[in-house]
Image (cartoon, coloured by chain):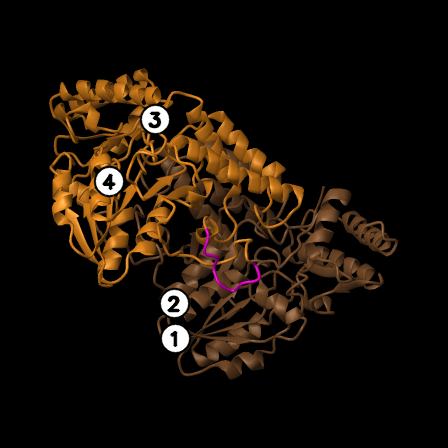
Chain colours: A brown, B orange
Amino acid sequence: MIYMDNAATSWPKPNIVYDTVSQAMKEYGANPGRSSHKMAVKAAQALITTRESLCRLFNTPNPFSMVFTFNTTDSLNLAIKGLLKKRDHVITTSMEHNSVVRPLMHLARAGIDVTIVPTDSTGIIDPVEIEKAIKGNTKLIVTTHASNVTGTVMPIEKVGKIAKQYGVLYLVDAAQTAGLIPLDLSKLEIDLLAMPGHKGLLGPQGTGVLFIREGTSLNQIREGGTGSQSESIYQPGFLPDRYESGTMNTPGIAGMGAGIEYILSRDQEKSFSRIQGMEEMFIDALNSIKGVKVYGPKSIQHRAGIISINIGDKDSREIVNILNNEYDIAARGSLHCAPLAHETIGTKDQGTVRFSPGVFSTREEIRICVKAIEDIIHRIKTRSI
Amino acid sequence: MIYMDNAATSWPKPNIVYDTVSQAMKEYGANPGRSSHKMAVKAAQALITTRESLCRLFNTPNPFSMVFTFNTTDSLNLAIKGLLKKRDHVITTSMEHNSVVRPLMHLARAGIDVTIVPTDSTGIIDPVEIEKAIKGNTKLIVTTHASNVTGTVMPIEKVGKIAKQYGVLYLVDAAQTAGLIPLDLSKLEIDLLAMPGHKGLLGPQGTGVLFIREGTSLNQIREGGTGSQSESIYQPGFLPDRYESGTMNTPGIAGMGAGIEYILSRDQEKSFSRIQGMEEMFIDALNSIKGVKVYGPKSIQHRAGIISINIGDKDSREIVNILNNEYDIAARGSLHCAPLAHETIGTKDQGTVRFSPGVFSTREEIRICVKAIEDIIHRIKTRSI
């Protein structure tokens, strides 16, 4: 199978990730931070090690600013609901995933003021439009780093500066970019960064991270046992315990740590360039095929390795089924859990056929995908499908 | 190492659990319910299979009433916060874990009325006291099924009947019992059952379940992509999608499914009797040692395989360290994230030394634990420690 669904979950993982998960379950499958016996201590150490690896990857000093969650959605819900109170204003874009939009719409019903700033039809936002939307009660700006539909990269550096200038907090959804596009938290004006463990960071599912910059005041969304201040019936107030209740996914977190170490052992810029190279090759080939529409920015500099297309007016689900059944290519069709983004690019009914190569994808695989699309178009023309 | 910390996380797991987690990562490490390609379909199937296994174990018909969460704390937060609104009244007991107490105390600050019904000093509750606490605005009763400190089993059948009689919902925290003590949801008047995947169900960490009986109206606590109703910016209203946002922990859930199948392939009553037999043997031996205090009910019928003790007035943490360092026994000391329970049994300062055997523990291991305790007492007396 040719796996082109890395934007959903990266696959395969480096072998060290599989091995680390197994080792964690078999050799130190105990509760981190809950007792002092060897296995519990080793489990706790695995969590610390992963926090430290995250800090190295994102160039930020405090391991306790890296809070473990269970997926990006969990991170985003924590950031959004931990911050916003009735009558607060929040600004977002028309390219967001439902993991941002649905929590915001839920809060909108409870009296929180939401502004959705439109992007152009390729998903590119003008930071000036975000600046214009800021009001006296604006508490938060939340944008994706790269759209999961078009791969459009947002100008997070510029938006961060605007946020800082107006004393507004900035939350970035790095679901598509963490581990893929280098991010330097010592330079970027990002207060909260939500990310999955199971995509660019190459870890297993069931893992997520919310970076909370020190000094950012955020309520927790879950209370429970933390292994700390056990004499108290109230949630502790310090990082990371305030936000990490109940037993953590130790094998998953250890596996994510192994994924991050794999990334750190390579040149991150080069790895991403390699993916962009494949993307460019794919898009160039697609642009020369009649009947294929490629979405998102023209310039590769504004793209993050996601190639969304349509073939004529064919339903994207149908094409994905054909790719799977007849060409053994795993792509994703339909609306990608991002209705606003589809509205923005004009594919609300059709959805898109999304290809997302990963670090283990090859140019040969891209060539096979191109040939498959050519073949499908030929068959559509000759009415054989 | 002799692992006596199964009340925190069961270890080891049946080999099939390790193998299933690995297989899930390697062979179908894609997103369940998000696309139609082979790996995504197989991942979705793994979730369904685990839901069905849960239904068989707990004797309930609807797989979609089994909602996946990330740990018991997550399940309990969903149940408690999804139900209670300002001015609602909730009843709980003095034996609860902080995973129940801390969310309730958080809500108490927001105007929810909380009654904590005291148990006796062994953790046994009189259901009549719960009945007496019911008021006109009582919406929920929440009790543990068995205390994580003393193993005291609560009369959930009787409490359930009282709840039903008064039209109050009943939430049971089965953190210590799910998979261990047989639970028949077709007979018990339980509306919500919270459980971990990584304890009695023998799955990996990062997994939890909330059983939501059909017809129970519960708000979600997270919104996000669900792979369903992707055209909508609002959370879907149906089970289980309403409560399952973002990428699920597929390998963990598949592993939990393998753990449940392992349990189902054996006689659950017999497996639990075996653990109770070890517990009885352990307690009998401890009762004959001068200087050891055993907490919890005298009768084995009221116990769930957890043995909490203290040696004289020695700090429980110190004993646990000695057990770990010098006897290679993994127990847990301190307050076990349950301050109210420790207040109830009078160990708020000392904590307890907790031993929790599991399905793979042996009577020989219990004998070694008893000998170690005898030895430690001897050394304390002779002042060699």
Instruction: Determine whether, in the image, residue B318 is placed left or right of residue B191.
Output: left
Residue B179, percent across and down?
37, 31
Amino acid at dot 1: Asp
Chain ID at mark 3: B
Q: Quadrant of the N terminus of chain B?
A: top left
Q: Which residue is mark 1?
A: A88
Mark 3 is on which residue type? Gly
Q: Residue furthest right?
A: A382
Distance from label 1 to label 2 (Cα)? 9 Å
Subunit under mark 4: B
The reply to whether residue A16 is visible in this rendering is: no
Residue on which disc 2 sits:
A83
- In the picture, the quarter occupied by the C terminus of chain B is top left
Q: Is residue B298 magenta?
A: no
Q: Position of residue A105 (x, y in %)?
A: 46, 67
Q: Which mark is residue B160?
A: 4
Task: Judge from the rendering whether residue A263 lies leftward or rightward of residue B168; answer left or right.
Answer: right
Which-is-in-front pick, marks 2 and 4? Answer: 4
Residue stretch in magenta: B230-238
Distance of label 4 from label 1 (alpha carbons): 42 Å
Circles 1 and 2: CB atoms closer than 8 Å? yes
Share a chain, discs 3 and 4? yes
Q: Position of residue B381 (x, y in %)?
A: 12, 24
Secondary structure under tag 3 reads loop
Residue B46 in the image: state x and y as whole percent.
Answer: 54, 38
- Which quadrant holds residue B205? top left
Which residue is label 3 attached to?
A: B358
- Residue B308 visible, this angle: yes
